[in-house]
Amino acid sequence: MDDMYQHGVRGWLAAPVPASAAQARAQQIWLGCKRFAANRSALAGLVFLLLLVIVAWLAPLIAPYNPFQQSLAARLMPPSAAHWFGTDELGRDILSRIIYGTRITLYIAVLTAGIVAPVGLIVGTIAGYFGGWIDLVLMRIVDVFLAFPSLILALAFVTALGPGIENAVIALSLAAWPPIARLARAETLTIRKSDYVAAMRMQGASHLRIIWSDVIPMCLPSVVVRVTLNMAIVILTAAGLGFLGLGAQPPSPEWGAMLSTGREFMMNAWWVAAMPGIAILLTSLAVNLAGDGLRDVLDPRHD
Amino acid sequence: MRQSLLEVADLNVSFGEEDERHHVVKDVGFHIGRGECYGLIGESGCGKTTVLRAIAGLNSDYDGSILLDAQKQPKARRGAGFLRRVQMVFQDPYASLHPRKMVEKVLREPLQIHGFDRQRQRIDEVLVQVGLDPSFRYRYPHELSGGQRQRVVVARALIMEPEILLLDEPTSALDVSVQAEILNLLTRVQRERGLTYLLVSHDMAVIAHVCQRIGMMQHGRIIEEMTSEAVRNGQAQEQYTREFLDASAAFAAALEGDAT
Amino acid sequence: MGFAMYWIPAMTEPLLEVENLRVRFAGNRTGRDAVRGVSFRVGREKLGIVGESGSGKSQTGRALLKLTPRSAQVTATRMRFRGEDLLTASERRMREIRGRSISMILQDPKFSLNPLMKVGEQIVEAYRVHHQADQKTARERALKMLEAVHIRDAERVFSLLPHEVSGGMGQRIMIAMMLIPEPDIIIADEPTSALDVTVRRQVLSVLNELVEARDTGLILISHDLNLVASFCDRILVMYAGRVLEEIEARNLRNARHPYTRALLDSLPRLDRHVDPLHVPQRDPGWLDGPVFGPEERS
């Protein structure tokens, strides 16, 4: 038993007394991973997402056909051995298009999260930490954004900026940061009154240092969780934009756009709409499950 | 008479909005000489912790003066010069350590802020002084017991080599046996470093153990100042102080046994 | 009986008998049960259970009323209240017993009182749950009870809401509420820890007065050796889930278990200066070592 723990990476991770900061941190992460893995549905969600990443990365190798290759002779073919998911109205292979579409979906989701989390975190912690007029101004701005449903807001921005995938990302981010800022602010309000922040002030730490080293690490878990849970909404909104013809432009194989064109053929070729629909559904479900698991691991209140 | 190191004069603190303002601390004044331990005792809500936080500069909304070495301190943020000389130990070690910071980081940050040299060495030294093995530096708070956490809190206060420690009920969140450990630590460090203490507590036995002079607070005022000998001999002038002493002594007497 | 080491004053009939009580939490990390083989009897007397955090004292109190969390498994060779087996009692029967026969006072009245209901109404309700009485009689009883816990101006206090009363008064109201159904035993878990020193004594003397007047059994659970020693007849000292020593309160200073001694010595004293304070060294042998009971005294 003891022998097992004294050797290799496992032993290093299980050592009762960490010998360096890196080891201590690695041990914490390892413990977190173990707890995450104990949650079966979260694990399933994560596995599915990893699968998506691999699929997006290896798309040219996996996809059986060129996603843009039209074949009018093979229009609206039902699922078969040759075309597992069938073909669309221009005879393109739907499976290949969904495989390539993964890249677009992940691109949108990751980029939006990458913009939303820092912006929301910075605005929220600054508003909550300083309070007073800074809080007032920032939160009124947040209120303005929150007053509109996110799809409407995104629509307005896309209309102003012009359709296209980059503009869709910007529009989605603009619509998604205010709730994150709200959340970060609420967390900050309790954190700034805590004794450990008082202790930092007693040590002469600057506001910036306190926000960076005390407030943000405490807000981060809930923000990360919220962002991952939001990711499902972002994917759906992106699909919605695509569906309305304001996101990725044809012929790019964006799932929402595919769903939109599939609508016309719903009656006699259900698979054209159903296949991208299922892809959207499964991806948002996986993101939600993984996000839930992440909350259990990261949120200190669940310890 | 020795020159006082820390002096508080006419301190008044109020909380709340205009129409519903609570006057929490009223005309509080006292002075502490170098190397002396002064205690503020009173029941919850008597304003003792508020006094401490005003001195620490954690609450700048006060009237009156706080003098360090006869230098009046500004009400706004305390300067680095003040903070290097005055540090604080908080009541609840579960709340005063950042749950996601390693002991190492907790102790290194003040050194970085004030540009100390030999950081690694200083961290090891202070850990040893508070009775923790240097291997504790890579632990997170949740891996430590209550007593160990409070030792880290004391270490954090000591690492800047201050002259004055403000102690806010440093043992009231701890078990009896751990309380003894921490009190021993505090008295030992005080002797070794010649520190000056301002201790706030509701426990007369704790205050009398650590302090030489004691201020009894009630409703935001210091109603009486006594020496710890006077407290041990039950000599109190004010009616309220006598009641307080009786209440504290009644429990202690039980340990002696009534059957003597 | 075997190793059981409890001791009963000759005069009191045992109300509650506990033998070999164990509380085990599913998936705890220490690998040790929260309560490990605790045995005692309580009659119409004041029994104190002292221990530090994690000693299992609160879990013992809760197990008696079967109020342990779901993740806990409670076993005992015997757990009887006036001869009735509590281990096999149905949840319905337990609800009758709680409050009517055994009631519990918790640390902070803020969390035990309904914040939206007048305190008087809550006392009335506590009475009517267990006694057939019309509103008027119940109200009179409640007012009388408020007077019994030394609340002046009971009429006024009756119609206050919990947030309008101070901590000390809140705890006296709790006592009134817990005593009005006239239970046989009261379990008080740290009843004064949230209160100030001067108020503490007042609340305890009220509790004492009522308990003695009604001949109610009391189990006082606390971390505070001073408090338990000054208040109880008999003390159980718990450590790591076990009772290490059972002793009469007036003999506490003659305690023989090294842990009890260490606890006594670790307290800073008001009458003389002890420096440094004695710090208890925990002996792993205590985990399963001998239990010190009063009957072994020679």
Image: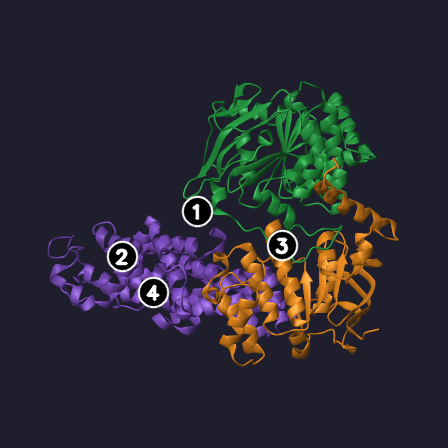
Chain colours: A purple, B orange, C green
Q: Are marks 3 and 1 in contact (CB under 8 Å)?
A: no
Q: Are marks 3 and 2 in contact (CB under 8 Å)?
A: no
Which residue in the protein does label 3 denote?
A: B180
How far apart, in angstroms, are the residues tagged by discs 3 and 1? 25 Å
At a point 46% along the width and 56% down the height, the residue shown is A299
Circle 3: residue type: Ala
As helix, strand or loop, the secondary structure at mark 4 comes to loop
At a point 87% along the width and 52% down the height, the residue shown is B238
How far apart, in angstroms, are the residues tagged by discs 1 and 4? 60 Å
Which residue in the protein does label 2 denote?
A: A276
Q: Is residue C192 left or right of residue C80?
A: right
Residue A301 percent coordinates (x, y): 50, 53
Which residue in the protein does label 4 denote?
A: A245
Q: Nearer the viewer, mark 3 or mark 1?
A: 3
Inspect this view and state whether residue C238 appears.
yes
How far apart, in angstroms, are the residues tagged by discs 4 and 3? 72 Å
Q: Nearer the viewer, mark 1 or mark 4?
A: 1
User: Label 2: how many residues lie within 10 Å, few (<14), some (14-19) or many (20+)?
Assistant: many
Q: Vertical placement of A40 versus C38: above or below?
A: below
Which residue in the protein does label 1 denote?
A: C30
How far apart, in angstroms, are the residues tagged by discs 3 and 2? 68 Å
Q: Vertical placement of B68 versus A187: above or below?
A: below
Do the residues marked 2 and 4 share a common chain?
yes
Circle 4: residue type: Gly
C104 vs B247, nearest the viewer: B247
How far apart, in angstroms, are the residues tagged by discs 1 and 2? 51 Å
User: Label 3: how many residues lie within 10 Å, few (<14), some (14-19) or many (20+)?
Assistant: many
Determine which quarter of the picture holds residue A192: bottom right
**Sequence order check, earlier mark of 2 and 4:** 4
Pointer 3 indicates a residue of which chain? B
Q: Is residue C63 left or right of residue C26?
A: right
